[in-house]
Amino acid sequence: MKILKVAFMIFVLCAVAYPQTENLGMGSFANEHGPILLAVDAKVAIEDLNSPYLMFIVYMASKNQNKNIEVGRNDVTMIWNGQEYKMPSVQELRKNYLAEIRDIDFYRHLNSAGIVSSWVRFYRWEGHTDFFPALRSGQVPVDAGSMSDSIGFTTKCYFKNPGLKKGDKVTFRVRDIKDPSVTSEVDVTL
């Protein structure tokens, strides 16, 4: 009986320790097993891995629709080879990278069928907030995105390219500003 209990505990710990990512195809990945539903569309990054900054479209929503969750820009990280990377500031990105508009146009031309086959289709997405709004869009960058009820938060996320290559796996981690134990992860294969 003790062996059965120990085996069950190991199984539970392994399930909690590793993100349960679903590969949606076409450069899209989702995880709906944490308190923050999380999906990443990595098509632009996959197609342009030589870029000094990589753009990802991140979708977040509260799994418990009665709970309000707020994720700050500093609470979104990319993990590669055990190293955690934070996003650059808007000022740094605009000073060192002049291809934001090209990235957005490129993203619009790519097929987004993969991401809409996930939980994402069941939420509403407010289009007036973004960590990295397009230049000349009239939007002001936000420091945090809020989620509650059936309203999610989607944003462009940029990370300085640490030398990623095709086939590398990175993990995206997000956590709630008020309660750091409310966290979710999704694995992305480039």
Image: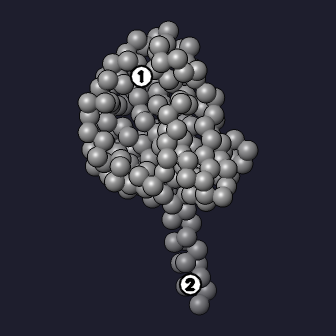
Residue 53 — which label?
Answer: 1
Q: Earlier in the sequence, mark 2 or mark 1?
A: 2
Image spot of residue 70 (x, y percent):
65, 42
- Give the vertical position of 147 relative to 74 (above or below): below
Residue beneath the point at 69% across and 41% down: 177
Residue 40, x across and y down, in percent: 42, 43
Q: Residue at x 53, y 78 (%)?
A: 7
Q: Is residue 35 visible in the rendered structure shown here?
A: no
Task: Using the rendered view, name the quadrant where residue 167 is placed.
Answer: top left
**Residue 144 visible to an observer of this rendering:** yes
Which is more toward the observer, 171 or 100?
100
Circle 1 sits in a helix, a strand or a loop, which is it? strand
Indicate which label's residue lies in the foreground, 2 or 1. Answer: 1
The amino acid marked with disc number 1 is Tyr
Q: Given the current orientation, which residue lies at the most extreme top position?
A: 95
Neighbourhood count class around disc 1 (C-alpha, 10 Å): few under 14, some 14–19, many 20 upward: many
Q: Quadrant of the C terminus?
A: top left
Residue 147 position, x and y percent, is 60, 46
For the residue pair 99 and 62, the one nearer the viewer reads as 62
Helix, strand or loop at mark 2: helix
Q: Answer with left or right where residue 31 lies relative to residue 69.
A: left
Q: Position of residue 88 (x, y in %)?
A: 54, 22
- Which amino acid is tagged 2? Ile
Tell which of 11 and 37 is nearer to you: 37
Q: CA distance from mark 2 to mark 1?
A: 49 Å
The 10 Å Cα crowd at callout 2, few under 14, some 14 to 19, many 20 or more, is few
Reading the image, the residue beneath label 2 is: 3
* Horizontal arrangement in the rendering, residue 93 relative to residue 112 (left or right): right
Q: Residue at x 50, y 23 (%)?
A: 133
What residue appears at the point 55 percent right and 78 percent down from the top-left corner?
A: 8
